[in-house]
Amino acid sequence: MIELKEISKKFGNTQAVKQVSFNVASGETLVLLGTSGCGKTTTLKMINRLIEPDAGQILINGKNVTDQDPDVLRKGIGYVMQNIGLFPHYTIAENIALIPDMLKWDKAKTKSHTKALIEKLHLPESTLAMYPHELSGGQQQRVGLARALIADPPVLLMDEPFGALDNLTRTSIQKEFKALEELRRKTIVMVTHDVLEAFELADRICLLDKGEVVQIGTPKELLFQPINDIAKNFLAGQRLVLEFKVVNIQDIWCYLPEEINYEGKSETAGLSIWEAMESLRKKDGDELFVSDASNTVKSVNFGQLTTAFNQYRNAQQHE
Ligand SMILES: Nc1ncnc2c1ncn2[C@@H]1O[C@H](COP(=O)(O)OP(=O)(O)OP(=O)(O)O)[C@@H](O)[C@H]1O
């Protein structure tokens, strides 16, 4: 769906992006991850031609973006800007209606789409008549998302979409973001410097360093098969939490105790180790019942869970 072929960009003497190539499949979320200044935003902005590359090609659905009129191109690409970028003198409703107005939707259609969308994003209808400064950071971030989603573009570019939020608000908006059906069908390229956020939301991660791609892979691949020390060190600080989040019960199934006969309520094996630990903690250390796709049930306590996890981890490291 989106294809970058050896894209480069220099600003004066600064090589911001150097021969970056990647593909994003239809419906996939690719996260561009890396430290400040590694070229994430520049790469993102070249996709919708806010910045023109010096070399290389960008194709969307096989069509070179440079062959398309930038305004027409951008109508099919939702864009959530860094620092939200709402227009201060427009009401929230007017901010959301920018693209629909450009597309010449009739007012009733814009109004009904806006109402439906803000409800899904947990924004009260009363905010529509307000101005951006009257909203909290989290609410503004939701408006930014609504503005990018209103015309249902197949491609969405997001630059640090949750960057302006405190950790708690950030976690809750990330959860809503993941659950939003509007986003499931979309091809998304998202920029973040936050490793946990990247792992939470990405199908695949493209790790950048000094304008170059270090590694592209699923969160699991980056964690368990880092290509070099740069990739390894980038995740080092949060390695254990990341492992608890990406490994699930199904992955460690063969290391868990024998199956049991149990017909009561059980959790699915898609549960991450992190979620399983949370459930066990809430149960005050009692057993957790988990079932896999063939409805085989196993009972697991905290000790068995951590032992099985460690066995899985050792096996990955020796692969
Ligand atoms: N318009 C510009 N003029 C000059 N230099 C620029 C310009 N835009 C970006 N750069 C430089 O290019 C490099 C990459 O910048 P870019 O904004 O793409 O990085 P980033 O990874 O998105 O960083 P951040 O997370 O801080 O936004 C940096 O060294 C930056 O200073």
Image (tube, helix red, strand yellow):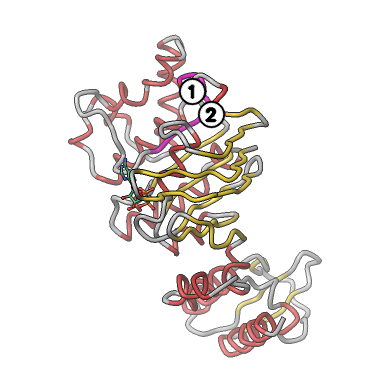
Start-end of magenta stretch: 71-80
Q: Amino acid at mark 2?
A: Pro
Residue at label 1? 75
Closest to the observer: 38 or 120?
Answer: 38
Local secondary structure at mark 2: loop
Residue at label 2? 153
Whole-percent x, y for residue 60 in the image: 61, 32
Q: Is residue 26 magenta?
A: no
State the CA–CA distance, disc 1 to disc 2. 7 Å
- Which residue sits at x=49%, y=51%? 18
- Count of numbered tags: 2
Local secondary structure at mark 1: helix
Whole-percent x, y for residue 84 in the image: 31, 39
Give the quadrant of residue 210: bottom left
305 vs 271: above or below? below
Q: Is residue 120 left or right of residue 92?
A: right
